[in-house]
Image (tube, helix red, strand yellow):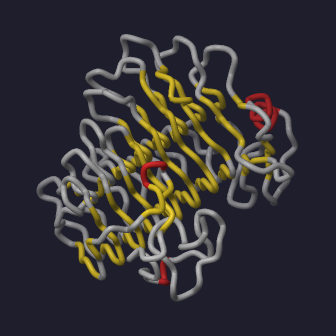
Amino acid sequence: MQRAADYLRSTAAWPSSGDVAVNLRPTGVYKTTTNPTATLYLGFDSAARAPNASRWLVWRRDPAYNGRAVIANPDGSDADKYGVVVSNTAYDNYMIFDGIRFTGESVPKGLAGSNGASTGVYLEGNNNHHFEFRNFELDGFRQTNAANFESVEGIFQSGTSGPLSLVNGIVHDIATPGSGGAGGHGLYLHGETGILVLNTLFYNMNHGFAFQFYTTTGHHYPGGNSIVSHCTFADNGFGANGGTTFLQEGASNTKIVNSIISYNQNGAPGLHFEVPDSPDPAGTGSNGDHLVFYSNAGGGRDNPSGWTWTNNLTQNPLFVDRANRNYHLQASSPAIGYTDTAYSPAVDLDGNPRPPGAEDAGAYEFGAG
């Protein structure tokens, strides 16, 4: 896989327009056999050989196969371990990752005795923009020395300008069980605006948050002009700093809708907000709508300034088999038909159709399982 990236960067003749695809077969695991920081490092350095608005670069499961291609974090003694690193240059933009599972293999990685990170995808800096993740899975990121602090994320971006979309995904089993420190997240988005999270299931974050919009320096509030819709957040936060989501009260025009937020533990509300730094004002135009809250240890949500809340329920969503992580809906679930159609896709996480005007809240349409 790295040889393909190096060939595209140094040798290939790119078309003037039209997407360029790299097909990854799901018949094995892509994982470096040596000891670098990442299995795949993307660092394009010329306009002639790099993706752009007219020719996106698509890393995808080979369409001749079913399932997901697997990219695993490398083993070894380096402090930080990543599945994919996208460098911070003007040419590392306009990329799609489709049909890929990014995994830490539920093995503690990074150099023992350090705070080495373990992350699926690292978007390095503020030059990057236009990324899409489709039909994805993020799981199993753990850190070797996690007793006091942990830095593990499914996706971590440190200033990317956006937009960023994550559609049809499963994020689960992230962070080291028993860790005493904060820092384990499914998505850790540090500066991004224009985010779409759609048809995505988040479960079993051992601590930390399913996703966090994290404030950057200079009082910039990420998560503005973003939509989170048809997601299921369940059974997260069994450990330090637990919770489901961590949003910015200072962000504007953010929508979290058509989603189920239930059984999330360890004190923080299901939807938790950071108050703007003084003297910055609260955001405007943000709302939560058609949400189903149930049995969150810290309550369903905070009460942030600048947000409105409509059409929300506090009822058992009635999952088919929560104990075995089957978060499809039973026939009597209150989530059935409980949506704002304006933020509904045509299909659910399984690819089954959602009937227009009668879509179900959460990642799955009733009967699809």
* Image mark count: 0
Rendering coords of residue 109 (x, y %): 49, 21
- Residue located 35% across and 52% down the image: 213
The one nearer the camera, 318 or 30, is 318
Query: Residue 21: x percent and y percent?
Result: 79, 49
Q: In this view, does 318 lie to the left or right of 242?
A: right
Q: Quadrant of residue 289?
A: bottom left
Please report the residue visible at 31 percent of the width from the left and 55 percent of the height from the top.
263
Near-viewer residue (184 or 15) = 184
Question: Quick one: quadrant of the N terminus?
Answer: top right
**Image x and y of residue 59, in percent:** 72, 46
Horizontal placement of 136 versus 303: left or right?
Answer: right
Give how far across and how far down residue 292 sits, in percent. Answer: 33, 70
- In this picture, residue 68 sits left or right of residue 180: right
Quarter in which the C terminus is drawn:
bottom right
**Quadrant of the rendered structure where residue 167 is?**
bottom right
Instruction: From the viewer's side, name the closer residue of 22 and 52.
Output: 22
Instruction: State the residue lying farthest toward the bottom.
Output: 357
Image height check: is 307 above or below 120?
Answer: below
Residue that lies at the very extreme toward the left in this rendered image: 278
